[in-house]
Image (cartoon, grey):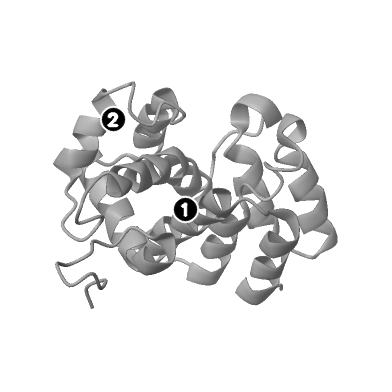
Amino acid sequence: MPNRADALALVEQWVTNVNLRKHMLAVEAAVRHYARLWGRDEETWGLAGLLHDMDWEKHPEEHPLKAVAELRDGGYPDEVIHAILAHRADFTGVQPETELDRVLFACDELAGLVHATCLVRPTGIDDLTPKSVTKKLKDKAFAAGVNREDVAKGLELIGLERSQHIQNVIDGMRVCSAELGIRGVDVGGAAPP
């Protein structure tokens, strides 16, 4: 089975947009966090999170079909491929059925909102709370590209209270906060440890 290094090589090959790469890393971190919480295969779940938008930049009109074809050829697990198809159920017709499908769908748009929220805060993700994210979720002008209907559908799919799901996404993204550029900066100008 391909591993994370293989997946990162695909990301580098297919995605030049830095912000899209950060989004993919954020979703990976959130999905991995759920895998750890629920005792699932973190590596497999992480691959789905990392690769879910692999073809968005080059083939937005066919997303995620081009990526899925490449992943199939590359020997990626059916579980990963199904989850990637299900995160665009409106386009692919593949409904989120498995836990991984539902988690990927639920983390995708919300990770984007959490990331955007961090960028407008002096302390970034360091002390971010679900309440702050919920406030931004209700402000439709903020991060207008985040599909609020998909966030709501994701909450239904995952079956958790909104604040708990938001906290889980925050906790997952904290793991790679420096790489995502969402850590706060202290008075001395250095990122906190």
Q: Which SS class for mark 2?
A: helix
Q: Residue at x 69, y 43 (%)?
A: 57
Q: Going by the picture, which residue comes out furthest to the right? A: 73
Among the 4 quarters of the image, the one containing residue 158: top left
Q: Residues within 10 Å of mark 2 (few under 14, many from 20)?
A: many
**Residue 98, position in %: x, y?**
52, 47
- Residue 58's place in the image compared with 123, above or below, is above
Number of numbered callouts drawn: 2
Residue 57 shows up from this direction: yes
Q: Nearer the viewer, residue 186 or 24?
A: 186
| Residue 27 disc label | 1
Among the 4 quarters of the image, the one containing residue 15: bottom right
| Residue 175 disc label | none
Q: Quadrant of the C terminus?
A: bottom left
Q: Residue at x 35, y 59 (%)?
A: 173
Q: Residue at x 25, y 24 (%)?
A: 138
Q: Is residue 150 left or right of residue 188?
A: right
**Residue 143, position in %: x, y?**
38, 31
Q: Quadrant of the N terminus?
A: bottom right
Residue 41 shows up from this direction: no
Residue linked to disc 2: 137
* Label 2 close to label 1 by CB (< 8 Å): no
Q: Which SS class for mark 1?
A: helix
Q: Callout 1, which amino acid?
A: Val
Q: Nearer the viewer, residue 123 or 21?
A: 123
Q: Is residue 52 left or right of residue 13?
A: left
**Residue 2, position in %: x, y?**
71, 72
Q: Callout 2, which amino acid?
A: Leu
Among the 4 quarters of the image, the one containing residue 18: bottom right
Report how far apart the C-alphas of labels 2 and 1 lie in the structure. 17 Å
Q: Residue at x 60, y 39 (%)?
A: 86
Q: Is residue 70 left or right of residue 6?
A: right
